[in-house]
Structure formats: C-alpha cells, structure tokens
Image (cartoon, grey):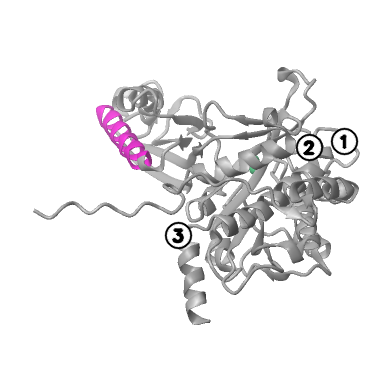
Amino acid sequence: MEPIKKKAPRQGQQLPPLPVTAAKIGERLASEVFLEEGQKLLPQLQEFRRDMHQHPEIGLELPRTQKKVLEALKGLPLEIQVGQDLSSVVAVLRGGKRGPRPVSVLLRADMDALPVREQTGDPFASTNGLMHACGHDLHTAGLIGAVKLLCAQKEHLLGDVTFMFQPGEEGPGGALPMIEEGVLDAAGRRPIAAYGLHVGPQDRGTFHHISGPMMASSSNLKITVYGKGGHGSRPHDAIDPVAALGEIQMALQVALTRRFDANEPIVITVTNLRAGDGAINVIPDHAMLGATVRVLRDEKIEQVRQMVVEVASSVAASHRCTAKVDFEVLYSATKTNPRENQFAAALWGGMFGAENVIPMETPMMASEDFGDVLAQVPGTFMWFGTVNPDTPEHLREWNHSPLVRFDDSVLGDQAAALAAVAFERLAAEDAHPSPATRVMRSAVEGLE
Ligand SMILES: [Zn+2]
Ligand SMILES: [Zn+2]
C-alpha cells in the first residue's frame, strides 16, 4: 500500500525560532536610532493625524485621504502606485543593501473611517457625520512615520519594504481588492513577512499579541420566514411567520451550545428583527432576522452555516412555514504566524520593555481584513494601547464608540516599532536565511 503523502508544511510553521539580530546602523543599534528619530517626527505625525481625523472618509473611495498620503510621501525615494478600483496607495522602498535577489517585508495601515457621529468634543473632532472611531487615522500617520524613518536609513536596508495604505477595512473590505491589484507582488516577489498594528483602549504604549487565531471570521446571516398573512384574531386561519421566527432566534443559541465544543469560540448575535408593516392586528406573510456570526476557526464556518440551515428550516416547518437562509462570509479569521509573532514580540520587548509586550489570554471575536494578507504571507498583527494607564477600565471607550479617544502621543513610538520590525526582519533573514531564501541565493550565485 502506498504511504499517505503529507502536505508540505507552510513556510514559517516548522522553521526554528528567528532570533533578533540587534542590527546596527553605524555604531548604534538600529532600534535606538528609530526610537530617537521617531520622537523627532512626532509633531508632524500628530498634525497629519489630526487633519485626517477632522476629515474622515469611509469605504473604498477616500480621495482626500489618498491625496494627503501622496503629499506626505512626496520627494521620498519610493516607487508609488495608486489603486485602480479603490483609493489605495502602495509604496515600495528599495534597500541600499538589497543584493541581486532581494527579499521584502510588508507593512500595512488601513485608512478608512466609520459612519459614526463624533461626540468627543476634541478641537479636531469631525463634523461631517463620519468618524475615525477605529483609529485608522493613527494607523495611517504611524505608517507614514515608518516610511520616513526607513527612507532615512535606505542605504543600510538589507532588502525592500512594501507599504500598504488600505481603504475599506470597515467594509466592504479593501485588503482583498489590493491583493488582486498586486500589492503582494509590488516589490517583485512575495514578502517574507507582513506586519500591522491596531490601536485600542489598552494602556498607552503596550503591545498585545497572540500566536495563531487572533481575530474571528465575520459573516452576515439573514433568515426570512414565509407564512400566510391574516387577521391577528384568527391565527389558525393564517400561517404565522413571526412565531416561527421568534423560536428560531432562541433555537439558534441553544443549538450552538449543543453542536459545538464549549471551547470552540462562536458568536451568533441577532441584531435585526423585522415583521409587519405597522398594523398591530395583522399577521404578516413574512418575517426577517439579521445576525452577525463570528467564528474563530475558518474550518468551522461551514458547520455553523449547516446548523443554521437545519434549525431555521426545521423550526419553520414545525410552524408550517418555510425559511430562506442567506449566509455571506465577509472576512476570514485573522491568524498570526507563531514565528513572526514571536520575532516581533521579542524585538518590541527589547525596544519598549518586556513588560509592555503582553500575551493576550484569548483571541478576540472582532474581525479584521488584514487576515486576508496573513492568509498568504506569514506575519503578525498586534493591538497597540493608546490610553493613559491611569484611566479606570469603565471610563475607557472601545473602538467604534462616538466617544472613543486615541492618544496620538504614541505616534513616534508606533512609527519606530513598524520601521524597526521591517529593518530587523530583513537583517534577520540575511543572517539566518530560510530554506527558500537560501535556494534563491544559490540560484543567483550559480549564475555568476
Ligand atoms: Zn473597526
Ligand atoms: Zn479597525
């Protein structure tokens, strides 16, 4: 009998841990240089961020934001492309020590806001009914800082860096269209690693990370139940879809706990219920439920969908109704690569103090479309705290609140962290090349 062939492990999963090489720029540690230079950039990054905060744009079309990013990158030694179908910006920096077959890393920031009416009362608060309530204005400003820091050290850089400025994270998704438009190949070949940060209400200057599944997939669920309308006093003559829908709503929660291991994180939250046209004495002929579904492991999504179909159709049938289920997967789960996560955690622990780089106890059930990049390139994504540590827990507004405030005094450090992880990752690959990099290099040597 033929032995069962195992699929080759994905690169990065079985490689030994990657040590931080403590790269130097001249006589000094590169990370120290970035920290110091990052602080010098702080006033201009805050100015950029506050202007962006005051003029939020949502979705895939961010014309003003894109223009401001392009202005900020003007004059720097970059190859710049703008998106065809969305207001993205991709900039590539070619390192001075890149060699004939260079490797590259990718740094990402999202740039879009939310349809939230700001209530912070800050002097730079938005007034157009939209708000940077998820802090993507800080992501953009921080990445511009990293571009500037790395451009200043271009001659010392052991490879290329792709900077990904992405719209549409809050919907309908900008990472995937950017991948389709070639962001992962912008530097010539796939990056060896990709990194991003997300600001949040954790203590200012702290990093929060986890290996493997970090954020959940997100799906939209819509269940429509069809019956037969009639007089509210004569339900026996009608087929009541409202009663069926009410039961389906509760049955989904019970079925979840019976079908899945209690350790399998899954959330179904019903957020919309619609039935009737306002007449209280009329049984409508259909009723609708909308829910957001969060599943931590992508391989479980199909089982959840199957369960929803079974529950909805069988409960509807028991009421002589029929049910139609629409289940649309919006974002897949965000998974960090353990090796890259550990590398960034070790580097940032060295730069900012090990006590400020904190393992998360559990993943989060929120979603993030950087997962689309991390599905193709090993990398990591961490939370970065922006709230004064003296603020009590109950006064910390979370992302998406109309009252949330992110302290932009972190921008110098944020820029330094991103610049350093790109710089150090290229240095680490040079010192400890992966098998793939070794093969590529020996191919070049063979040609010489
Ligand atoms: Zn958000
Ligand atoms: Zn966000």
| SS state under label 3 | helix
Q: Earlier in the sequence, mark 3 or mark 1?
A: 1
**What residue is at 82 percent from the left and 40 percent from the top?**
408
Q: Earlier in the sequence, mark 2 or mark 3?
A: 2
Is the residue 298 above or below the residue 72 in the image?
A: above
Q: Are marks 3 and 1 in contact (CB under 8 Å)?
A: no
Does the beta carbon of the residue at mark 2 sit less than 8 Å from ligand 1? no
Is the residue 255 above or below the residue 421 in the image?
A: above
Q: Which mark is residue 435?
A: 3
Q: Name the residue at the bottom extreme.
A: 448
Q: Position of residue 231 (x, y in %)?
A: 39, 27
- Residue closer to the observer: 222 or 166: 166
Crowd class of label 2 (few under 14; some 14 to 19; many from 20; radius 10 Å): many
Q: CA distance from mark 2 to mark 3?
A: 50 Å
Q: Position of residue 233 (x, y in %)?
A: 39, 20
Which callout, 2 or 3, points to the residue nearer the camera? 3
**Residue under numbered circle 2:** 118
Is the residue 99 above or below the residue 427 in the image?
A: below
Q: Is residue 417 visible?
A: yes
Q: Which mark is residue 122?
A: 1
Q: CA distance from mark 3 to mark 1?
A: 52 Å
**What residue is at 73 percent from the left and 24 percent from the top?**
396
| SS state under label 2 | loop
Q: Amino acid type of disc 2?
A: Glu
| SS state under label 1 | loop
- Residue closer to the observer: 258 or 441: 441
Whether 311 is among the magenta residues is: yes
Q: Which residues are magenta?
A: 300-319
- Residue closer to the observer: 333 or 304: 333
Q: Amino acid type of disc 1?
A: Asp
Q: Position of residue 212 (x, y in %)?
A: 48, 39
Crowd class of label 3 (few under 14; some 14 to 19; many from 20; radius 10 Å): few
